Image (tube, rainbow, N blue to C red):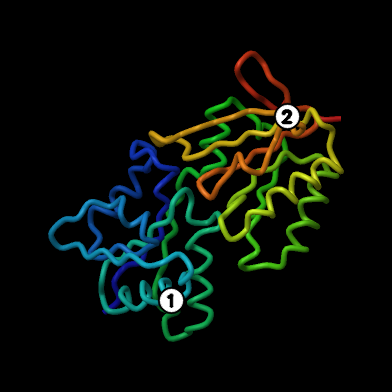
């Protein structure tokens, strides 16, 4: 007997930003599977088993969730933000591709508010025109690909959002990203550092590229980069809808 499998986005941190659809799925789940700090956001209750695992075992976590659902459980795999943005939705489909015996399990993906959108809303509308999103981690792709995409995005004058900008094991990569921006953009380009957005630890700084330093970010920070037209209006930052 096959159960159900939902992969759900918990939003950026504020419980009020969890969608009703995700809340309903969690209320009927028998099992919640995910990275340790995300599972910790789910209250314990009778009839619910919490399966918390480390961040570097995504495929094993996805396979475990599929097996639970195949055995008849009502499973919710939780991610922060949106599960389709550098998160568990892709890992689940990768696990299905590698384990055809689990291909009969139906997967529902429930969207959530991702950090770049929450951060953009906090300051105004910096992503109001064409933009792209780049993961600065090289855990799953070579760093030269990151650099190439970053440089081309800057040359195309996209606004940008950087995820996973700087960790203890990768302290140099955001610094290199800022160097590339210096090579491709003017010093007045606006940069937004949004840490732990929508949580009590939220901290947001808006600076120019000339003022930006890698030490302004960590793994709880999303970095937004404006395009050439992005500007301040009072205390807000916005990118005009028109270009050219």
Q: Please name the residue shown 72% across and 38% down the image.
A: 159
Q: Looking at this view, is 180 or 172 the one in front?
A: 172
Q: Tag 2, which secondary structure?
A: strand
Q: Looking at this view, is 71 or 36 the one in front?
A: 36
Farthest-out residue, top: 234
Relative to 48, residue 151 above or below: above
Q: Earlier in the sequence, mark 2 or mark 1?
A: 1
**Residue 125, image x, y percentages:** 62, 28
Quadrant location of the C terminus in the rendered image: top right
> Label 1 neighbourhood size at 10 Å, few (<14), some (14-19), many (20+)?
some
Q: Tag 1, which secondary structure?
A: helix
Q: Which residue is mark 1?
A: 60
Q: Please name the residue shown 55% across and 47% down the image.
A: 218
Quadrant location of the N terminus in the rendered image: bottom left
Q: Quadrant of residue 120?
A: top right
Q: Which residue is mark 2?
A: 208
């Amino acid at each position: 007997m096959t159960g159900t499998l939902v992969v759900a986005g918990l939003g950026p941190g504020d419980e009020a930003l969890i969608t009703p659809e995700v809340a309903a799925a969690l209320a009927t789940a028998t099992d919640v599977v995910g990275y340790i700090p995300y599972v910790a956001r789910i209250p314990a209750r009778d009839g619910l088993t919490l399966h918390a695992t480390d961040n570097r075992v995504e495929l094993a976590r996805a396979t475990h969730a599929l097996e639970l659902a195949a055995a008849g459980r009502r499973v919710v795999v939780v991610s922060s933000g949106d599960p389709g943005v550098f998160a568990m939705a892709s890992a689940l489909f990768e696990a299905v591709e590698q384990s055809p015996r689990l291909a009969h399990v139906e997967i529902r993906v429930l969207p959530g508010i991702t950090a770049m959108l929450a951060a953009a809303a906090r300051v105004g509308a910096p992503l109001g025109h064409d933009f792209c999103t780049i993961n600065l981690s090289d855990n799953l792709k070579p760093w030269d690909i990151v650099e190439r995409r970053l440089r081309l995005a800057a040359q195309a004058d996209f606004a940008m959002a950087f995820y996973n900008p700087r960790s203890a094991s990768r302290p140099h990569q955001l610094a290199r990203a800022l160097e590339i921006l210096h090579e491709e953009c003017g010093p007045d380009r606006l940069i937004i550092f949004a840490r732990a957005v929508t949580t009590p630890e939220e901290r947001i700084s808006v600076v120019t590229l000339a003022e930006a330093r890698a030490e302004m970010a960590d793994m709880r920070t999303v970095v937004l980069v404006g395009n050439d037209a992005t500007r301040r209006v009072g205390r807000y930052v916005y990118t005009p809808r028109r270009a050219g």
